[in-house]
Image (tube, helix red, strand yellow):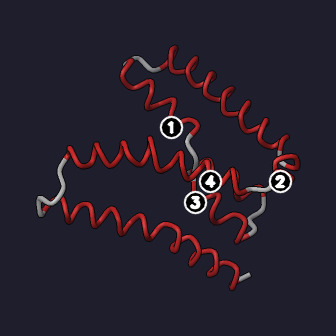
Amino acid sequence: MQNDFWGSILFSISVTLPTLFLLILGIFLRKRNVIDDRFSQQATGIVFKITLPALLFLNVFQNPIKHLNEQLMMIWVCVFGTLLLFLLAEIFAEKFVADKRERGTFVQGVYRGNCSILICTPKVGLNNQLIKVQIFYD
């Protein structure tokens, strides 16, 4: 169990550390006036409109079709669960979030992913009760 825990921690660090380094590099380049807001907007547009969709397409294209058949039920549950959660969050936000500008932030926060659970849980093997506590307090 001890080796599994430290292996999970090292795996989590290896996943999150590159993002942290890029964030620090961006702050450094911004302070040196190498990049500005215009660059950030253009880079964000390239990433989210071109490279990320291309990466997703390639990952789906390279995945054998037999895996799709095995996971079809899970895909439908995820799609309908996300849509249902989105609609319920919109209804809740309509009634309880007074500032209309904050509703989108609230709704996005309701169904955003929590990467720490996805990264650590399979490696550590936490029981269901600990996962519920982690989700509640995260």
Query: Going 66% across and 28% down the picture, which residue do you hit?
Result: 83
First of labels 4, 3 by sequence position: 4
Q: Amino acid at mark 2?
A: His
Callout 1 secondary element = helix
**Viewer-side label of 2, 1:** 2
Residue 92 lies, in percent from the top left, at 56, 20
Q: Which residue is mark 4?
A: 58
Q: Which residue is mark 1?
A: 109
Callout 2 secondary element = helix
Mark 2–mark 1 distance (CA, rounded to whole Å): 31 Å
Using the image as rendered, state which of residue 55 and residue 40 is in the foreground.
Answer: 55
Would you say the residues marked 3 and 2 are in contact, meaning their CB atoms lie under 8 Å apart?
no
Within 10 Å of the Cα at label 2, are there few (<14), some (14-19), or many (20+) other Cα atoms? few
Within 10 Å of the Cα at label 1, are there few (<14), some (14-19), or many (20+) other Cα atoms? few
Within 10 Å of the Cα at label 3, are there few (<14), some (14-19), or many (20+) other Cα atoms? few
Q: Which residue is mark 2?
A: 67
First of labels 3, 2 by sequence position: 2
